[in-house]
Amino acid sequence: MTRVAAVDCGTNSIRLLVADVDPATGQLVDLDRRMTIVRLGQGVDKTGRLAPEALERTFAACRDYATIIKELGAERVRFVATSASRDASNRDDFVRGVMDILGVEPEVISGDEEAELSFTGATAELTGRDDLAKPYLVVDIGGGSTEFVVGDDAVRAARSVNIGCVRMTERHLVQGGKVTDPPTPDQITAMRADIEAALDLAEQTVPLREARTLVGLAGSVTTVSAIAQNLPEYDTEAIHHSRVSYDRVREITESLLRSTHAERAAIPSMHPGRVDVIGAGALVLLSIMERVGASEVVVSEHDILDGIAFKAAREAGAGKQGG
């Protein structure tokens, strides 16, 4: 097995996975998996630039991760940056900062690459399960974008569109510099219209309605699962491969969009960094389920981060053979 470190830097969070991976068998053994809310995409939709304070929060997390990677002795490090850093005019500042701290250049990948990595990470463990029909539709609801991937054992079609929990919140639920609590009906209607337009765009490329199993990834989906199970705290094992019905997703979404900041913050499984954006993220999930006619969503804690680790391990193995 190959010990690798994978870093996924998105719009809302930055995550680290250090794991021993056997790419031949699909086996992945976690050594350390963690997430830090950094809001790298703060204001990017409006200004087109990464804010200085957002960069510093991200670099602080990178310094913490560098210590862990060194302690665990990863053979290869792969750092993937997604939506916010694709869109920013000053992304060179971000690239230089990461290289100085971690010694690797962040790969600012395309939406299609992001989708393929998400699919690999999410479905590697599902192969061979008789209770989950193919093709899969994997949806990765991030902070700035959502990736849609349809595939069986490999990707058939993929598309990334610019709807995510942070982007939708900043675009529709902020007035006077503050998040509206709770949002108004007009705000929700406008956000829903924006989401539906993005789904129309995704459906031009990806046959969403052909999917037999919907697999949902990332913090908005896992948080909805935690709420659905009434977990006393966020519990990865309870959330991974849980199933949440459409009716339950609708109930939770409507409740979140009626609630205040304090009410959402009081939910035991709610990460503090998701309190203001979870309503928008849940609405994206609900809209997807309605579009594809899904009766449930299968929730996965394994996603793009695991896909990055698999690819890093394959590259490390190829390097050894070449050497």
Image: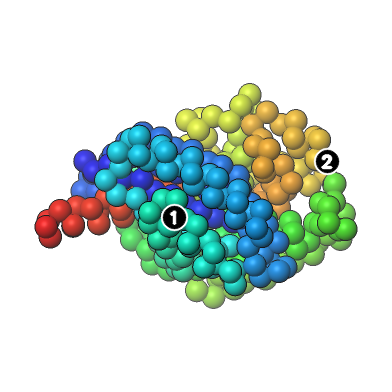
**Badge nearest the viewer, 1 or 2:** 1
Of 105 and 300, the residue lying toward us:
105
* Neighbour tally class for label 2: few under 14, some 14-19, many 20 plus, Cα within 10 Å: some
For the point 42% across and 43% down, which residue is it? Answer: 66
- Name the residue that disc number 1 marks: 100
Residue at the outermost top position: 232
For the point 67% across and 49% down, which residue is it? Answer: 282
| Quadrant of the snapshot with the N terminus | top left
Of 145 and 318, the residue lying toward us:
318
Q: Secondary structure at mark 2?
A: loop
Q: Kindly tell me whether residue 191 is visible in this rendering.
A: no
- The answer for how far apart the CA atoms under marks 1 and 2 are is 41 Å
As displayed, is residue 194 above or below residue 164? below
Residue 287 found in image quarter: bottom right
| Quadrant of the snapshot with the C terminus | bottom left
Of 275 and 193, the residue lying toward us:
275
For the point 66% across and 53% down, which residue is it? Answer: 53
The image position of residue 154, as x and y in percent, is 33, 61
- Name the residue that disc number 2 marks: 260
Q: Secondary structure at mark 1?
A: helix
Residue 22 found in image quarter: top left
